[in-house]
Amino acid sequence: MNLATALKAQETPRIVAAAPAGPPAISLRGVEKVYRTDRIETVALQSLNLEVGSGEFLSIMGPSGCGKSTLLNVMGLLDRPSNGEVSLGGRVVSSYRDKDLAALRNKEIGFVFQSFHLINDLTVVDNVELPLLYRTMSGRERRRLALEALDRVSLSSRVHHFPTQLSGGQQQRVAVARAIVGKPRLLLADEPTGNLDSAMGDEIIGILTELNERDGATVVMVTHDERQAAKTQRIVRLFDGRQVH
Amino acid sequence: MLRSTLLIAWKVLTRRKFFAGVSLFGIAFTLGVLTVAAALFDQVVGARPPEVNAHRTIGVYSVMLGGEHMQNNGPGGYALFDRFTRGIPNVELMSIHSMPYSVFSYQGGSRRKLYFKKTDGEFWNLLRFDFLEGGPYTEKDVAEGRFLAVINEATRERYFAGGPAVGKTLEADGQTFTVAGVVPNLSLLRFAVGADVWVPHTTSRSTRYRLESELIGGYTAFYLARSKADIPGIQAEFVSRMKTVPLPSKQYDRIVAVPETVLQNVSRNLFGNRDAVASSKPILIALALFTVAFMVLPTLNLVNLTVSRTLERSSEIGVRRAFGASRGALVWQFLVENVFLTFLGAAFAFVFAGITLAVLNRADLLPYMQLELNARVMAVGLFLALFFGVFSGAYPAYRLSRLDPVTALRGGAH
Ligand SMILES: Nc1ncnc2c1ncn2[C@@H]1O[C@H](COP(=O)(O)OP(=O)(O)O)[C@@H](O)[C@H]1O
Ligand SMILES: [Mg+2]
């Protein structure tokens, strides 16, 4: 935590010198992802080895189509790699069945997407409660946690609004609240500021940074914005599905 | 989990009023029609007063005399039942009564048609009428040939202005009866028991019906088994007794008669071996198939609406998967949503059916139709709603749950 704060103070991206104690949050070994459609084979990821330390804040950068989202989806157990091995908190998940992966995502991972992906039929607080529906807990407890998460993103005054009644920045804050409501150890954000103006974007980055620093969450963020990436501890650059150094 | 699933189902519905409206209309209409059909079915075969013991009552609704070149079909004769089928083990009560037949009455100066039924005294023990006044005639009254009658409420209304009728006289078919009791109107759809006026067998003008040769006539016999389990034994004994019945002429080589439930009777005539006791299963299966066939189109319609809605909900599916919903959880969610929708439809269907039944009852298509939306009919309606919900929800739920999360999220982006 102190190290992270210190690094952040320098405002320069740095590779964390020593891996933190304990298993890494995520570890990819020899990961490949190939998409096969009728004729075309697209190699989205190639021989990727990557470790994300527990408590790290990492950016992924690279040109469009280089495989950033694919990488994030593989890390988030939404997509299985064609080859290679993914471990989450030291557990190799290759053999996990759909149900086990779902349970792991529910407990360990929070997602933030570029296009928010809120459910417009549900109010803000119902959206935030969603991850907790897949846990056993009372409705009252769910509501309490959701309100707490909304408080973290300063949206306590909008709990009964519908997403479409909010600005883009507010919607993304709801999405962040949803990502953190289950207190996951890992936050994955795919261009979370891509649809926002820079002021709103900075707000989101501020919240993610605080979650990383105050709560010790591991954060992996895809971004196109060098300025934002500079605020994180390490930048991984992809080109054509490969990591470039 | 169920509570929040229902809550979300409700929210999704109220936010999609058009979808909900279209779906609900289709469901309500389909279930409404089926509920009306169930009410008709219930009217004919459901256990209710006076047939409170329907589940352990079997009746002989038709008798066939068969030969190589001849066949004679019809309701059985009084004598056939009276002489050959008394004292069957495990029969608690037995009653012989005629089919309803119409007679004219000129009482009060105008000509009116009345449905009469001739019965024995046991008729009133086997069947439990709720007498509005007075009571039934007894076996002793029948034996003594007393001209007593039980009339229904409508007949009391006509001839006695709705006032007390017991002890007063009713003239019909040239005979005069003293009213012994009054019972509520009973639909003639309950053909085996319903009538306007019930009178003793012994009031018949001739005693021909007692002749042993009268194997075919206008009569039904009821046998009340001690328990439902005794029915097959009673049927077997009955069938074996038929073999001892002397046939009226050389043209015939057998007599076929089986005491059975109404459903077994329909089943035997439609599908079965006419000479043997039939199971009521085929007719129930036929009814079930008919019901399913009736639901196919609305189901396809609902499936279509639901599936076309999935594109809109692709983002939701991706999000739910990302945040920890397993495929099973999604299948469950969409099934519950669908069943919730069909239950809501059932609520409207009951209103629709209630109105339709009231209109049908009023229209007086058949005398004293009393179609009603009782607990049994509603249970059938709810079961159909559940079935409909699962039936129409299974395919969309399966499809939605198979969407992989990444594709779902991408599909939802645009
Ligand atoms: N489902 C898919 N089917 C086929 N090709 C895909 C699919 N998803 C991604 N790709 C391809 O894989 C490559 C990487 O995509 P993506 O990870 O989305 O890139 P980025 O997020 O860096 O823009 C691209 O060439 C893209 O066209
Ligand atoms: Mg991308």
Image (cartoon, coloured by chain):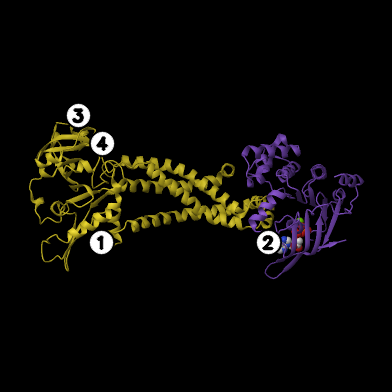
Please provide percent x and percent y for residue B294: 42, 54
The residue beneath circle 4 is B130
What is the crowding at mark 4: few (fewer than 14 residues within 10 Å), some, or many (at least 20)? few
Report the amino acid beneath label 3: Pro
Q: Mark 1 to mark 2: distance in Å?
A: 60 Å
The residue beneath circle 2 is A95
Circles 3 and 2 on the same subunit = no
Q: Are marks 3 and 2 in contact (CB under 8 Å)?
A: no
Please provide percent x and percent y for residue B345: 48, 45
Q: Is residue B70 left or right of residue A238?
A: left
User: Dot 2: what SS?
Assistant: loop
Using the image, name the chain to which the residue with label 1 belongs.
B
Circles 1 and 3 on the same subunit = yes
Using the image, name the chain to which the residue with label 4 belongs.
B
Chain A's colour? Answer: purple
Q: Quadrant of the N terminus of chain A?
A: top right
* Chain identifier of the yellow chain: B
Report the amino acid beneath label 1: Ala
The residue beneath circle 3 is B164
Where ligand 2 lies, by image quadrant? Answer: bottom right
The residue beneath circle 1 is B276
User: Dot 1: what SS?
Assistant: loop
